[in-house]
Image (tube, rainbow, N blue to C red):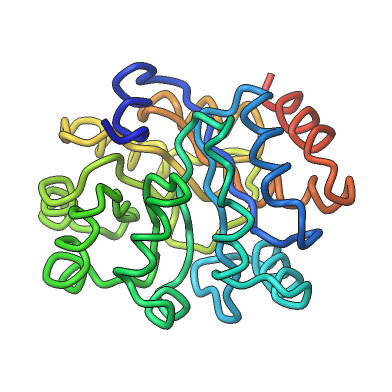
């Protein structure tokens, strides 16, 4: 069974997924960050593939991607860094990146490398759903790679159900129609959106991302989904502690208590 599916089968609530950008703040820190996060009880990790024009990301993750590229990170190097990660890491690992570098690599070659490294899924924010269905899904299914699709408050109910019907793993529920970035709390409108999706009784579990940074936002996300994805806050802390993932995740989890 794919590790993503097994996670939601075994632990369906209050899950914590952490995003970081590979190659930032240090080029060689990727594997250490992953191992440190697992050791500190994180349930799933999203590994950002740096790209020069990340349309869905706020300034924190944009800057992290820029720094990673300046450090020399590339998709080929990232695969090399993750070559032995499954010797001791057991939790699901998901790539998050944009279509351009993946297409340059070749999608089937990308999936083959994901299998070799033990990557369980991929989030591609700029992948059109029609292209996913017609071109990418058959290849990803062949390699047992979950392609995770995003929904927002503007996504129609028809499209939400279509995504639910044609994907597997989980649905990434974007908290708002803005870019990534920490928020102090979620207003009534966002929480009504969470409840609306919860009441649709979808087949796939959902994880809420964008704006999760503290106990209030984490608890609000978990109340109507399987858990929350934290990105910008962890990336900020990782930079503040100069790549010390132990200090960064300890500080982040303190803020969730």
Within the image, what quadrant is residue 92 found in? top left
Above-or-below relation of 153 to 92: below
Foreground: 253 or 71? 71
In the image, what residue occupies the spot 48% across and 49% down?
117
Residues 235 and 193: in front is 235
Residue drawn 68% across and 70% down?
Answer: 73
Residue situated in front as seen by the camera: 77 or 240: 77
Indicate the position of residue 95 as horizontal and vertical percent values. Answer: 47, 55
Horizontal and vertical percent for residue 202?
Answer: 17, 35
249 left or right of 54 in image: right
Query: Which quadrant is the C terminus positioned in?
Result: top right
Q: Position of residue 201 (x, y in %)?
A: 16, 30
How many numbered circles does the render carry? 0
Taking the image as shown, residue 24 lies to the left or right of residue 103, namely right
Quarter occupied by the N terminus: top left
Quadrant of the rendered structure where residue 33 is? top right
**x 32%, y 52%: residue:** 148
| Direction from residue 249 to residue 97 in the image, left or right | left
Q: Residue at x 20, y 63 (%)?
A: 139
Q: Kindly indicate the quadrant of the structure image that contains residue 76.
A: bottom right
Tell me residue 222's x, y (percent).
45, 26
Q: Is residue 103 left or right of residue 165?
A: right
């Amino acid at each position: 069974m794919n590790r993503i599916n097994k996670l939601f089968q075994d632990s369906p609530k209050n899950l914590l997924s952490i995003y970081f950008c590979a190659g930032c703040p240090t080029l060689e820190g990727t594997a250490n960050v992953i191992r440190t996060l697992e050791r500190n009880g994180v349930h799933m990790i999203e590994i950002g593939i740096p790209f020069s024009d990340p349309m869905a990301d706020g300034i924190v993750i944009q800057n992290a991607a820029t720094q990673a590229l300046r450090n020399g990170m590339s998709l080929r190097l990232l695969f090399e860094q993750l070559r032995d990660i499954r010797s001791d890491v057991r939790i699901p690992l998901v790539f998050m990146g944009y279509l351009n570098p993946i297409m340059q690599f070749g999608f089937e070659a990308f999936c083959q490398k994901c299998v070799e490294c033990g990557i369980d899924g991929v989030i591609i924010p700029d992948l059109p759903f029609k292209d996913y269905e017609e071109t990418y899904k058959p290849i990803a299914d062949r390699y047992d790679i979950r392609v995770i699709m995003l929904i927002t408050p503007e996504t129609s109910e028809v499209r939400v159900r279509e995504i639910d019907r044609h994907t597997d793993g989980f649905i990434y529920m974007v908290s708002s129609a803005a870019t990534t970035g920490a928020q102090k709390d979620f207003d009534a409108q966002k929480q009504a959106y969470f409840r609306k999706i919860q009441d649709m009784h979808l087949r796939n579990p959902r994880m809420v991302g964008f704006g999760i940074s503290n106990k209030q936002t984490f608890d609000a996300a978990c109340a109507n989904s399987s858990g929350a994805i934290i990105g910008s806050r962890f990336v900020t802390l990782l930079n503040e502690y100069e790549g010390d993932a132990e200090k960064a995740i300890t500080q982040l989890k303190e803020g969730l208590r």
